[in-house]
Image (cartoon, rainbow, N blue to C red):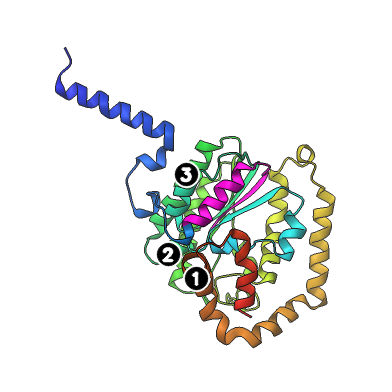
Amino acid sequence: MMTRRGETHVLFRGLLAVCLTVTGLSACVQGPETVVPKARWFGWMRFHQSLVERAKKGNVDLLFLGDSITQLWNENEVWKRFYGSRNAANFGICGDRTQHVLWRIQNGELEGIDPKVVVLMVGTNNVDSGSADEIAQGVTAIVEELRHHRPKAKVLLLGIFPRGEKPDEIRAKLDSVNAKIAELDDGFYVKFLDIGKAFLNEDGTISRAIMPDYLHLSLRGYQIWAESMEPTLWSMLEVSGAGYKAHRILDIVRVGNRRRDMGWHRRDRIRAEFTVDTQAIRSQRVCEDLVMRRRPSATIGDLAPNFEEATR
């Protein structure tokens, strides 16, 4: 005859098994807020639902997952050149923290797609409320969740990009996070790549030609991202199976380098000098307003052009 204690133990094991089967490990383990899946409201939920609908359509070989830095890739010139023919999808949402990305993964954003590579970069929005350990735990939970739901997919885990004009405590915290999540690199399914130094000047400062508000990227910043990531991304994709034109992508990198030498950087710098007074204080606000308040019915495709127009 089973005792009450034994019945309780069996019930707990049963509930744990159900939790692991349905949601994966990260949703069953309580810890800091960075690892506890959480939804947001208002326009965010509409954006999430638009991504769920996009996933249902399938045909995604390359998935970008993250926050506003990822979302603002959306259909810009660099994206079209590097990823337009690669069945790529952008699942970034402004303001997301690790716990929000976890919730999205568990609530339909992977249903219908089986990407070959997931490019993940998230955590900068946790910096004000979480320690380096807690942020790293949140990123780890996302990687575990991706591996649980899509075990065949490879994860290209990017180090969180540097932010702020000069090195400071926030940058130091992000460096600590990156050092911790670098340990997730298993040599095959998960590859860690830190391209942060590519955005920095020799003295460690960040130019507004690259990050107009010292957080979000300009078009030139996205060019740097794409060029710096391409060799690793290319090696992770099954080029022949997906029909990618590898030689064309390498040509794009070379052309981009020539354009930089011919004055691309100078053009961005000149434009930035005319906008520095407004860009730094408005870019994140515009991003959040479009997603959360002013445009509750907006779709993912609406954000990037409006962001560019509002911050000129």
Amino acid bearing label 3:
Asn
Looking at the rendering, which quadrant does residue 215 occupy?
A: bottom right
Left or right: residue 93 versus residue 17 is right
For the C terminus, the quadrant is: bottom right
Question: Which residue corresponds to mark 3?
Answer: 107
Amino acid bearing label 2:
Val
Q: CA distance from mark 2 to mark 1?
A: 26 Å
The residue drawn where x is 44% and y is 65% is 173
Residue 87, placed above or below residue 94: above
The residue drawn where x is 79% and y is 39% is 240
Residue 272 place in picture, x, y as percent: 65, 82
Label 1, secondary structure: give it.
loop
Residue 28 place in picture, x, y as percent: 36, 39
Question: Which residue corresponds to mark 1?
Answer: 294
Left or right: residue 139 versus residue 115 is left
Lower sequence index among marks 2 and 1:
2
Residue 140 can be seen in this image? no
Relative to the observer, which residue lies in front, 125 or 74?
A: 74
Q: Is residue 64 magenta?
A: yes
Residue 277 place in picture, x, y as percent: 56, 87
Residue 113 can be seen in this image? yes
Tell whether label 3 touches label 1 (CB within 8 Å): no
Q: Residues within 10 Å of mark 2 (few under 14, many from 20)?
A: some
Q: Residues within 10 Å of mark 1 (few under 14, many from 20)?
A: few
Q: Is residue 122 magenta?
A: no
Instruction: Tell me the number on the disc at residue 127.
Output: 2
Q: Residues within 10 Å of mark 3 (few under 14, many from 20)?
A: some
Residue 126 place in picture, x, y as percent: 42, 61
